[in-house]
Amino acid sequence: MKLFLVYRNGNVDLDEYESAIVVAESQEDAIQMLKASLEEKYREGQEELWGNFDVTVKEVSLIIM
């Protein structure tokens, strides 16, 4: 498993999430987990809460140099 920082591109309202840390196998899995979480909590049709998933995904390294 890897850590990914997922953050929205574009404007974010005050009551919306700007970013999240997700544990997943791949970048695509991280986005799918966020989508599944939204559907579970708010039902379908709430993609705008994550900017319709116009996001940037970066792997977070835990290696300290």
Image (tube, rainbow, N blue to C red):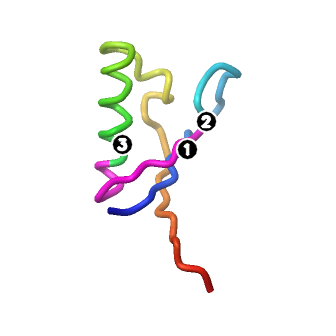
Residue where numbered disc 2 is placed? 18
Q: Eyeballing the image, is 21 above or below 52?
A: below
Q: Secondary structure at mark 3?
A: helix
Residue type highlighted by circle 1: Tyr
Asked if the residue at tag 1 contacts the one at tag 2, i.e. Cβ–Cβ closer than 8 Å, the answer is yes
Q: Residue at x 43, y 28 (%)?
A: 52
> What range of the chain is rendered magenta?
19-29
Measured in 3D between alpha carbons, the distance from the residue under mark 2 to the one under mark 3, in whole angstroms, is 14 Å
Residue 7, by quadrant, is top right
Residue type highlighted by circle 2: Glu
Measured in 3D between alpha carbons, the distance from the residue under mark 1 to the one under mark 3, in whole angstroms, is 10 Å
Q: Per the image, is 20 magenta?
A: yes
- Residue placed furthest toward the bottom: 65
Residue type highlighted by circle 3: Ile
- Residue placed furthest toward the right: 14
Residue 7 is marked as 1
User: Residue 56 at x, y = what percent?
Assistant: 50, 49
Asked whether, in this view, residue 3 is left or right of residue 12, the answer is left
Callout 3 crowding tier (Cα within 10 Å): few <14, some 14–19, many ≥20: some
Q: Eyeballing the image, is 11 above or below 57?
A: above
**Could you tell me which quadrant the C terminus lies in?**
bottom right
Residue 31 is marked as 3
Residue 22 is marked as none
Callout 2 crowding tier (Cα within 10 Å): few <14, some 14–19, many ≥20: some
Q: Residue at x 31, y 21 (%)?
A: 40
